[in-house]
Image (cartoon, rainbow, N blue to C red):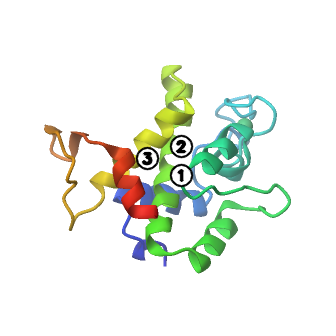
Amino acid sequence: MLWKIKALPRCSDLVWRACKNILPVRKRLTERGLIEDPVCPLCGEQDETVVHALLLCNEVKKIWFASPLAIRINDNEVTSFERWMCCMLSRGHDDGMIMVFTLAYVIWSRRNQWVFNNKMLQLHEVIAKTNSLLATGLPDEKPQTLNDVTKCRDDCFNISIDASLRANVLFL
Ligand SMILES: [Zn+2]
């Protein structure tokens, strides 16, 4: 079911790893004796589990709500990332689910940028990055506002486009 969603492979892979509970979140690394501090590096308030890192962290809830899908994450309803995702998959339409997968990926990337590069992407940057990834992930429809494509690696393109227009096309 998860692989039917035509998100970018890296986004689907992240969602799959999150559902399997195998992301290297701090709680897990602590349990394995690799680090000592299980606390979330973004909010500093709770242990960083997968469901916290991707959904329940207050720093992350803002992103879900600010997205075009305006998703509210309710602490009382969300018990695990996998359950939440199953619920979303059973209700969401494909375009919406591609955005959900992409947002989860960007949220995890943002966390890693903070942990490893000490760089915190702001809300508007997160949404812009999500829109940019969504535009790259449309194989059968070329972005009409594509300004520049630079091949930098075999599997990586830098693409500069008007991403907000693209998002409107998808989710109106
Ligand atoms: Zn947190």
The correct choice, above or below, for 87 with respect to 44 in the image is below
Picture quadrant where residue 21 is located: bottom right
Q: Residue furthest top?
A: 118
* Element type where label 3 sits in the image: helix
Q: CA distance from mark 1 to mark 3?
A: 9 Å
Q: Amino acid at mark 3?
A: Thr
Q: Is residue 28 visible?
A: no
- Residue 157, numbered label: none
Residue closer to the observer: 87 or 169: 169
> Picture coordinates of residue 108 (x, y %)?
53, 43
Residue that numbered label 2 is attached to: 108
Tell which circle, 2 or 3, labels the residue nearer the N-terminal end: 2
Q: CA distance from mark 1 to mark 2?
A: 6 Å
> Picture coordinates of residue 79 (x, y %)?
78, 62
Residue that numbered label 3 is attached to: 130
Residue that numbered label 1 is attached to: 104
Q: CA distance from mark 2 to mark 3?
A: 12 Å
The correct choice, above or below, for 172 with respect to 126 in the image is below
Tell whether 153 sits left or right of 171.
left
1 and 2 marks in contact (CB < 8 Å)? yes
Tell whether 5 sits left or right of 42.
left
Q: Amino acid at mark 1?
A: Ala
